[in-house]
Image: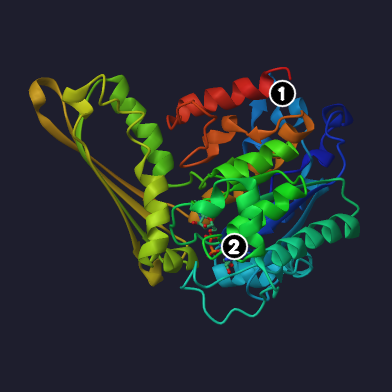
Amino acid sequence: MGASYRSPHHLPESSQMQTDQGRLGILLPGLGAVASTFIAGVIASRQGLADPVGSLTETGHLDGGPMRDALGLASLDDLVFGGWDPYRVTALDAAQRAGVLDAALLEKLGPELLEIKAMPAVFDRDWVPALTDTDNVKEGASHLELADALRADVNAFKEENHLDRVVAVWTGSTEAYREPGAAHESLAAFEAGLEASDPSISPSQVYAYALVREGVPVANGSPNLMFDFPAMHELVALTGTPVAGRDFKTGQTLVKTALAPMLAARLLGVNGWFSTNILGNLDGLVLNEEDNFKSKEVTKGGVLGSILDGETHPELYGDIDHLVRINYYPPKGDDKEGWDNIDLFGWLGYPMQLKVNFLCRDSVLAAPIVLDLARLLDFAARRGESGIVDWLGFYFKEPMALDGEETVHHLFEQETRLRQALLAPK
Ligand SMILES: NC(=O)c1ccc[n+]([C@@H]2O[C@H](COP(=O)([O-])OP(=O)(O)OC[C@H]3O[C@@H](n4cnc5c(N)ncnc54)[C@H](O)[C@@H]3O)[C@@H](O)[C@H]2O)c1
């Protein structure tokens, strides 16, 4: 909350040398708690009103100097924001509704936040039943028409803001879990499905299609299956677009993928890991629906297996009861509690317990990830990378892996891979 931070334009000229990349547009499907905390935080940092703590790209170092300079990343001053939401909100409304940032700070940022107005969304309540009375939803004769309308929005955003480069980060709600079907099997089937408004195609997949068709690099901050099926792999390859996902690694999973390596390094056994979350924000309300929680359960549940290796050490990790729960409890708001109870055992099998109570703030942890993903995806695109950007796995609960490669969950291996990839000549 200090006021010491200054964005790069306050630095001596020599450290700005490589940051002159022009303006970067960031499109956010979903103007909710995470998106508004991110946008407000960037504006506050630009004005020197608060510090962008937790952002590697803004405060981290690489190769002996600031990462943003080493990589020539877009400066905070060069970021331009846009977004979609099924409610007719501005970024200020969204921040006030989310209740994450205090009113005094929002008052100072108000004029800029009011300028960012949600574009009408592609939305279907079938996929997010908890959201009622929406008033800002696109109408179209087919899913394809809706995708075309999104593509027109992207182009209008570029033109109005004189942008050459745009990236997108999905900050919209978690949709109900549904396995991909026949419409997802090839690009031709998917496009036919869009034309026929196939109900197995989710709104987030319509966004994924529209954005990738426009060559916009996309990061998926939710557990939604935006890119995880053959049709989208085909489209990503065809258009040469970088994509990354899925589900921001913020609170409990961040802790879990840092603690599990410690237990594995010391070869301490684990019988059980019970994780529960108590939260009261809109995300919590959405996840209170069984089908929407199922999406989260998939991304939260898979992280231990690759770190606590039950094949090599069945005696230590062969039979772990791993339970994950999310409890919607309105008084908590965005101040989530993550409780972890780990039943472990050591020398001669003697049992022990480790209990972690992380009193975190969900969107405060997610906002710097949005900033890093937007800038690093843009960096990847400028460097000519396309397809799944697996080295961004550091930021995700369920990182997308390249064909035939294992998903890495270990936080410190992910950090090493990220840094190596950033330094690798391309
Ligand atoms: N906050 C975190 O720490 C965190 C961590 C990991 C993942 N996530 C995921 O990030 C996403 C955003 O989280 P949040 O806390 O900001 O949630 P939120 O509920 O505050 O915001 C989501 C916004 O998306 C909008 N939305 C829903 N469907 C949409 C659509 N089809 N098109 C455009 N907008 C749509 C909603 O109206 C809402 O404003 C969620 O999927 C959440 O699960 C959040």
**Mark nearer the N terminus (1 vs 2):** 1
- Callout 2: 10 Å neighbours few (<14), some, many (20+)? many
Q: In this view, does 220 lie to the left or right of 9?
A: left
- Callout 1: 10 Å neighbours few (<14), some, many (20+)? few
User: Quick check: marks 1 and 2 in contact, CB under 8 Å?
Assistant: no
Specify the quadrant of the image occupied by residue 177: bottom left
Taking the spot 70% from the left edge, 66% from the top edge, the residue there is 146
- Residue type for callout 2: Pro
The residue that label 1 is drawn on is 65
Asked whether residue 35 appears in the rendered view, the answer is no
Q: What element carries label 1?
A: strand
Taking the spot 42% from the left edge, 46% from the top edge, the residue there is 299
* 159 to 238, vertically: above or below: below
- Residue type for callout 1: Gly
Ligand 1, by image quadrant, is bottom right
The residue that label 2 is drawn on is 203
Whole-percent x, y for residue 284 in the image: 43, 64
Taking the spot 83% from the left edge, 59% from the top edge, the residue there is 157
CB at disc 1 and ligand 1 closer than 8 Å: no
CB at disc 2 and ligand 1 closer than 8 Å: yes
Q: Where, quadrant-wise, is the C terminus in this rendering?
A: top right
* 152 to 168, vertically: above or below: below
Asked whether residue 346 appears in the rendered view, the answer is yes
Give the number of the disc on residue 32: none
* Mark toward the viewer: 1 or 2: 2
Inter-mark Cα distance, 1 to 2: 41 Å
* 89 to 321, vertically: above or below: below
Whole-percent x, y for residue 386 in the image: 70, 33
Whole-percent x, y for residue 159 in the image: 90, 57
From the viewer's side, name the closer residue of 202 and 409: 202
